[in-house]
Amino acid sequence: MKKRVLVTGGAGFLGSHLCARLLKQECEVLCVDNFFTGMRRNIEPLLSEPAFEVMRHDVTFPLYVEVDEIYNLACPASPIHYQRDPIQTTKTSVLGAINMLGLAKRLHVRILQASTSEVYGDPDVHPQTEDYHGMVNMVGPRACYDEGKRCTETLFYDYRRQHRLDIRVARIFNTYGPNMHPQDGRVVSNFIVQALKGEPITIFGSGAQTRSFCYVDDLIDGLTRLMNVPQEDVDGPINLGNPAEMTMCELGQLVISLTGSRSRLEFRPLPQDDPRQRRPDISRARQLLHWTPKVSLEEGLNKTIDYFDALLANSREADKL
Ligand code: NAD
Ligand code: UDP
Ligand code: UDP
């Protein structure tokens, strides 16, 4: 019997890669998504697989299905998307978690939550370790996402303590790669699309703020490892990300050089509460999951550039029709 795995947010960037990986591992996959930011195009190549099933559903409503394992990824992840309807964002995180935890409890199955480095807010501890409790402005424009995810983590650990559920929490740091939404507003997709179109590279603030970027294949490897280690080996949340840190100006220059673009850097106002620095301490993941990212930034960016290049070429073709 194949393992039947539920992936919520399965049509999104990370979700679509996870569905593909699980199918390769001979699982049956049930992809649940309301297509708020997910794209049919992301899961198109999977639709012909008999072991793949898609269900349009909003996780803020109860879900009654039969599965052996749950990955809860449903939630818009880019600031422009999660701030478009902030109340819905908090509901997706909190009500979505309650429903998925209720489902896991009824079925007695293992459940993994996609949490985020945003739980650390604008961190004054650097690099961020899992025992740092973070610095989040709970009434700012990012709070719907950050506090939603923090509450989700609380719910996961309370379901573990109160109902002995087998839970896992991954704190995912900035991840990039094919299947990102071209208008999703995240820095890697913005810079690549701008460079390929020869438009200005929009640097928010001075560009001295830092992030650490992980290629999607490495991240998915980390997620599946976390799901599959014995429960006694994972006591708390685990950071997953690539510790290679850089400024946004450095990233802009690198994207320009890899695309051979004539774009220039253009400076725009810094959004409120934008974290100044971010880098994961991944000692726990290294030790417990024997996981470490393998794909260099240059290699990962080249693959992502190829993806957006093909996407833009297709949309130019479509415009001609
Ligand atoms: P994404 O926006 O591409 O994917 C999210 C998916 O969830 C989309 O397909 C969307 O349609 C779906 N969704 C949103 N609200 C829903 C709802 N109420 N019911 C059902 N489906 C819903 O984002 P992503 O980058 O793939 O992120 C996936 C998960 O990983 C999110 O939970 C995000 O918080 C987390 N994460 C991602 C990153 C990253 O760098 N990509 C970093 C940290 C955490
Ligand atoms: N739930 C669900 N699917 C299930 C079981 C539960 O969506 O298969 C939802 C249910 O609607 C409930 C939530 O999960 O609101 C939490 O369930 P739990 O059993 O923890 O709480 P209770 O039902 O006692 O409020
Ligand atoms: N950013 C930027 N230009 C853009 C988009 C984002 O300079 O066109 C900056 C943004 O202000 C932040 C960093 O890049 O400092 C990462 O932004 P993203 O939205 O990708 O992720 P997050 O802020 O959630 O880490």
Image (cartoon, rainbow, N blue to C red):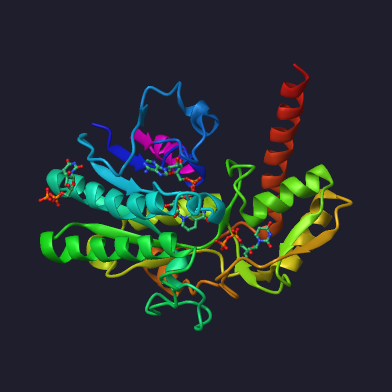
- Which residue appears at 84% of the width and 46% of the height? 198
225 on left or right of 108: right
Question: Residue extending furthest right?
Answer: 262
- Which residue appears at 65% of the width and 56% of the height? 187
- Residue 53, percent from left and from top: 36, 27
- Which residue appears at 61% of the width and 43% of the height? 178
Was residue 25 drawn as part of the magenta stretch in this picture?
yes
| Magenta range | 17-33
Judging depth in this view, the residue of 68 and 56 nearest the camera is 56
- Residue 58, percent from left and from top: 34, 38
- Residue 200, percent from left and from top: 81, 53
103 on left or right of 243: left
Tell me if I can see residue 26 in this picture. no
In the displayed structure, 305 sits above or below 48; it is below
Tell me if I can see residue 110 in this picture. yes
- Residue 305, percent from left and from top: 72, 45
In the displayed structure, 17 sits above or below 321; it is below
Q: Quadrant of the N terminus?
A: top left
Was residue 274 drawn as part of the magenta stretch in this picture?
no
In the displayed structure, 160 sits above or below 1; it is below
- Which residue appears at 38% of the width and 78% of the height? 133
In the displayed structure, 265 sits above or below 282; it is above
